[in-house]
Image: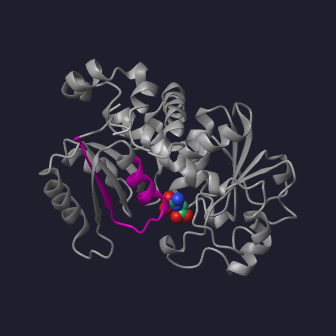
Amino acid sequence: MRHLISIADLERQDIERILERADSFAEVSGRSIKKVPVLRGRTVVNLFYESSTRTSSSFELAAKRLSADLLNVKTLGSAVDKGESLKDTVRTLSAYDPALVVIRSPWAGAAELVARWTPAAVVNAGDGKREHPTQALLDLYTLRQRVGALDGLKVWIVGDVLHSRVARSNVLAFGRMGCEVTVAGPPTLVPREIESLGCRVRASLDELADADVVYALRMQRERMEGAFVPSLREYAARYQIDGRRLRPHQILMHPGPVNRGVELSAEVIDSPQALIAQQVESGVVVRMAVLYELLASGGEEEATYGTGFTEEMPEPALAEVAGRPE
Ligand code: NCD
């Protein structure tokens, strides 16, 4: 695997491998010295054209815990011509010979373009409303830790599906793992084409009691031009997940940031049914696993990494390598 642009790039077995790798890194994260030398001497660029708390900080920690050199480039607010400026920026940063570029951008398709403009591996950390594959992977990881096997699980993704890259990646990812996925929300915010990704569509929460997992989405107001719902109050009345709608057997997930009182009520956010804090925690080990997958686990990169990595640090001995903090 050269890049991670979309969940569609991954077969189920690829996902399983990444989640297992994340598990092995969870052990490292539990130590007081949370560092392994897997990416020593390699450069990771975090290129963020949009605000981010969880995604950028967890990619940063992931790269550092693998001993990579990290360059954080935040270009929020840049108003120059977008296609050109992105290309120029990527070409400029490529002069530092990064092994991998993490890109978040408001433009759908940006990660694919970056992959054309740099010889580095590219990870899509959110491209407009299209995809956010590492979020979906960390969601699978978190859910699997709570419930074990995901096959046959009924997952409802609720809210502003239209503007959500998380929704698109998660419909694909949950589907790959054998879940039955339903998306629900106001018809103005749930495009019917989403069914082609392998899910059912519902305009109300009448059948929500069927769900094993309720995955709530934020109203992505920054991507809305015009009004998609009469008001947030009316949206909340019909679609908010609150203590009445969330049944005791159901698990609640949300990618963050949460708008308290809009898509979720305070009582459910703080309930033991919510995995929201665990999702954030999983972000680091899953992103470590993705960096490892692209840079250290084989494929064309191994040729250059081979002498250092495969001889001195064979892949099966990861646990042992992990035992030698720098
Ligand atoms: C999401 C994003 O930015 O796509 N957040 C995240 O990465 N944790 C979802 C959102 O902003 O609502």
Count of picture labels: 0
Q: Position of residue 317 (x, y in %)?
A: 41, 21
Task: Identify the image quadrant of residue 85.
Answer: bottom left
- As drawn, the residue found furthest toward the left would be 95
Q: Is residue 233 above or below residue 8?
A: below
Query: Residue at (73%, 64%) from the top-left corner?
Result: 269
Q: Residue at x 33, y 35 (%)?
A: 38
Could you tell whether 91 is left or right of 8 in the image?
Answer: left
**Residue found 17% across the figure and 55% down from its top:** 93
In the depicted view, which residue is nearer to us: 134 or 169? Answer: 134
Instruction: Name the side, left or right, on which 149 lies relative to 94.
Output: right
Q: Which residues are magenta?
A: 41-62
> Residue 53 colored magenta?
yes
Task: Name the quarter where the N terminus is drawn.
Answer: top left
Q: Nearer the viewer, residue 45 or 70?
A: 70
* Residue 50: % across, % down: 39, 67
**In the rendered image of this protein, does residue 83 appear above or below residue 229?**
above
Model colouring:
one colour
Let me know if residue 59 is in the magenta part: yes
**Does residue 167 appear in this view?**
no
Image x and y of residue 190, in percent? 63, 59
Q: Is residue 264 left or right of residue 171?
A: right
- The x, y position of residue 301, in whole percent, is 25, 29
Image quadrant in which the C terminus is located:
top left
- At horizontal 62% and vertical 37% (from top left) the residue drawn is 175
> Is residue 268 visible in this depiction of the protein?
yes
Along the horizontal axis of the image, is 270 left or right of 319?
A: right
Vertical order, 302 against 150 (above or below): above
